[in-house]
Image (cartoon, rainbow, N blue to C red):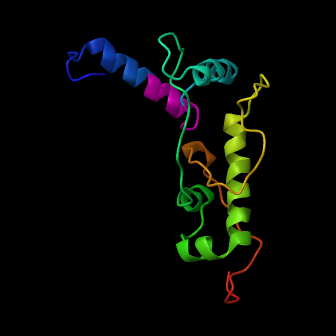
Amino acid sequence: MSVHVPHRPEHLAMARQLLAETRAHDGLAPVDLEQFWADQEIATRDPFGPDIPQVPLGAILTGECVYDELGIEEDCRRYEEDAGWRLELNIAFNDLAERITANPGGSSNAPTTRTNSQPCSTESTRATFAPSSSRKDGTT
């Protein structure tokens, strides 16, 4: 909403409805994933086109999100220095995130492979994770 558009009671009702639906779905806003990926494909072909159905999805993410989402204590130094542990965390997080971003329609823009890139954060992926590798100093 723009600051130039006056607040209307129907806007508040729409926001409350969306929040109620989101709470009812474990923190996820309702979305038709098949339609989302179809619209994403159109939007990425011409990101500034006047007729795109949505803004193209794009995000820059960092590794800090894995700790809270996987339910483990933050250890930025180890995350930076221990590539094997970082990859293990990223894979565990990506496995959780893929449940939400799974593409039932098979669009080519859907995430299909794991990489060593930083994972993204999604509130509904919260889980408990116990890394199998131990710390360099022998503690877990």
Q: Please, which residue is most extreme toward the bottom here?
A: 137
Is 51 situated above or below 90? above
Which quadrant of the view contains residue 73? bottom right
Is 24 situated above or below 135? above
Please tell me which residue is depicted at 44% across the width and 29% down the height of the picture: 19
Residue 21 on the magenta span: yes
Magenta region, main secondary structure: helix
Task: Pinpoint residue 77: horizontal percent, then vertical percent.
Answer: 55, 76
Task: Pinpoint residue 55: horizontal percent, then vertical percent.
Answer: 50, 24
The reply, left or right, for residue 103 in relation to residue 30 is right
Residue 97 on the magenta span: no
Q: Which span of residues is magenta-colored?
A: 18-28
Q: Quadrant of the N terminus?
A: top left
Task: Pinpoint residue 114: horizontal percent, then vertical percent.
Answer: 76, 49
Q: Quadrant of the C terminus?
A: bottom right
Task: Pinpoint residue 75: horizontal percent, then vertical percent.
Answer: 56, 73
The reply, left or right, for residue 123 in relation to residue 140 is left
Of residue 60 and residue 20, the one placed in the foreground of this image is: 60
Please tell me which residue is depicted at 43% across the width and 21% down the height of the picture: 17
